[in-house]
Image: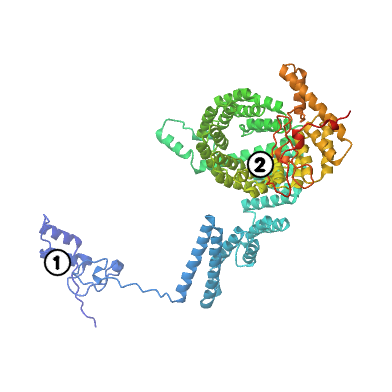
Amino acid sequence: MMQNVHLAPETDEDDLYSGYNDYNPTYDTEELENDTAFQQAVRTSHGRRPPDGVTRPMTAVRAAGFTKAALRGSAFDPLGQSRGPAPPLEAKNEDSPEEKIRQLEKKVNELVEESCVANSCGDLKLALEKAKDAGRKERVLVRQREQITSPENINLDLTYSVLFNLASQYSANEMYAEALNTYQVIVKNKMFSNAGRLKVNMGNIYLKQRNYSKAIKFYRMALDQIPSVHKEMRIKIMQNIGVTFIKTGQYSDAINSFEHIMSMAPSLKAGFNLILSYFAVGDREKMKKAFQRLIAVPLEIDEDDKYISPSDDPHTNLVIEAIKNDHLRQMERERKATAEKYIMTAAKLIAPVIEASFAVGYDWCVEVVKASQYVELANDLEINKAITYLRQKDFNQAVETLKMFEKKDSRVKSAAATNLSFLYFLENEFAQASSYADLAVNSDRYNPSALTNKGNTVFANGDYEKAAEFYKEALRNDSSCTEALYNIGLAYKKLNRLDEALDCFLKLHAILRNSAQVLYQIASVYELMDDPSQAMEWLMQLISVAPTDSRALSKLGGLHDSEGDKSQALQYYYESYRYFPSNIEVIEWLGAYYIDTQFCEKAIQYFERASLIQPTQVKWQLMVASCFRRSGNYQKALDTYKDIHRKFPENVECLRFLVRLCTDIGLKEVQEYATKLKRLEKMKEIREQRTKSGRDGSGGSRSRREGSAGSDSGGSKGERLSAQLRALPGAGEPYESCSSKELDASYVDPLGPQIERPKTAAKKRVDEDDFADEELGDDLLPE
């Protein structure tokens, strides 16, 4: 039985609006809340719902915030703000296993990143410690995952990154065995995809260890596991294989590798290594072809014309100015500089061998370069040709080659003139050196080498102020010109501006930390400033850099000697003598030291060395004989004096010693030596009389000849031998102090005066040499 359903009558939309318009044609909006008809219309017009009763469900708009329970007449609240604030989030349970695993994984990632950052900053030890810590925590993480989840859920990427970073840090710290073991763990794990590529790193380690056979083996294994689509990586591995073959001397195999690279993807490194391989096997024609292929390698950089503005548009000019020196442009410059370096090195290598003479070889290289994209290098090769002439001591050809550039462009002309100025300066032709230095400066005013050479020519002429100005200008043009900075220090040193000189050398020391010349100059300046302690400190640094520098050792010995430290002075002088046994000053000091300390036997070897270095100087041989006499070896002393007399028959001192020795020993030769001595003394008197009367004539020249030969051709009756070579006193010894000074004015005894010894009552010592003050008796002369 059907029930009657009462439905609210539907109202047409047209009827609704027409009734509304008839009611209020002017539509006043101020009293809408109190307008009963308007409120009724609003309630009944939404979906044509009846004013009372159960509302129909509105499922189509429920997602926008309307609910079934919303009553008619309630406020419009699409954001649901009337429901109140949202409930608080559930707190994380940090003690849950999943949360602990997430935190531990985060910590491992942080340690790997910190290790990489430390490596990039140069702190290799810290990087290794972080990598080890990451490895330990990663193993703990794996064990925890295995306990709560299946093995398939293990983070293989994290394990791979930890092991790879650890191996890299081992390799960076030169712990090659540990690095190889770690790489083996990665390579042998089949779960790591593409792990075979790491065999390249293992090959690099074997290459560093000079285990070339294993390096080649691992390179080839890595090459087999890399698909052919990865062309660039395969080329790099082939490059490593070729370099390893060069190191092992297998040049034919290296040639095959580099030929393959040049045919597939030509590069500068491969082309240069190919030239080296052909040079090693001596194949001239292949060297030429490889050089041509090297020059043909494309640089893939923009031309300089790109950075020239084609118009006066300010925006375009601003853009060009911005990109003229950006990172990309700097990279292009570096690539071009590298290419030029390879080409110049290869040309200098093959030019002397590809033709009969190196000049013809250079000419061939120059022609090839001129026909390529490196036209500017042709002039540089010509200048290198001139430098090669210099190395071969062919200065004339070098000068002719450099003079060819006098009519070239300014840059090349300046470089050639600079080298010419340098050449003439070495030959002490300062006028020519100055002329070409002026030409170089006029061609390129900003050439620091030309300004330095000009300063050198002015320095050689003694104008140190002007030279310093040229050096300053060179430094203004190029602050890294160490030659100018060194020379300006020397100029200030000559001008006695020691503080400024020291400042220059200290600045240079900051640039050239291990320069022996700079260290020596700093020590020299401190010595001139009367600061021996600082001078010795800098000389010690010099010896640490150049431990075999005999001059620095002798200088250090001299400073210790001036400070009264004889033992240290002896040590440094002896080291200097050991490295350079021909330094007369060092030999002289050592001999004098042993004379002063009464070790005459040790002094003999030094004076004998000096007599070998200066055989025409009689003083060294007299010192040897005196040392024999002091040590009590009279027979050896007599033989030495006789040998000196044969070499220098007119030496008066030698004859005096011979007369005394023969008299005391009782030899018959005493009359012969006494006669010679008397004759020499009479000749001396005659020469003196001629000198006084102005009639010396040829006698003066003869006297000079005798003096140059080291002989003693005159002297008063009271002259003596060197005070340092007086005889040591002793009981029953007739030679207590019988050394006198040579008459030759050029001779100065290096040993200085002898130290006076106190006299004793038991043994009276003679202070004066008997035959130095008295004439020989007539009984010693022949009838």
Q: Quadrant of residue 294?
A: top right
**Nearer to us: label 2 or label 1:** 2
Which residue type does callout 1 highlight? Gln
Q: Is residue 300 visible?
A: no
**Secondary structure beneath disc 1?**
helix
Question: Which one is earlier in the sequence, the residue at label 2 or at label 1?
Answer: 1
- Please state which of residues 630 and 231 is positioned toward the viewer in this rendering: 630
Q: Quadrant of the N terminus?
A: bottom left
| Res. 357 mark | none
- Residue under label 1: 40
Q: Evaluate if marks 2 and 1 touch, with contact meaning CB atoms under 8 Å apart.
A: no
Asked if residue 543 lies left or right of residue 8, the reply is right
Asked if residue 296 lies left or right of residue 118, the reply is right
Residue 388: percent from the left, percent from the top? 70, 33
- Categorize mark 1 by other alpha carbons within 10 Å: few (<14), some (14-19), many (20+): few
- Residue under label 2: 551
Residue 217: percent from the left, percent from the top? 71, 58
How is the protein colored in the picture? Answer: rainbow
Q: Marks 2 and 1, how far apart in space?
A: 119 Å
Residue 760: percent from the left, percent from the top? 70, 48
- Please state which of residues 544 and 583 is positioned toward the viewer in this rendering: 583
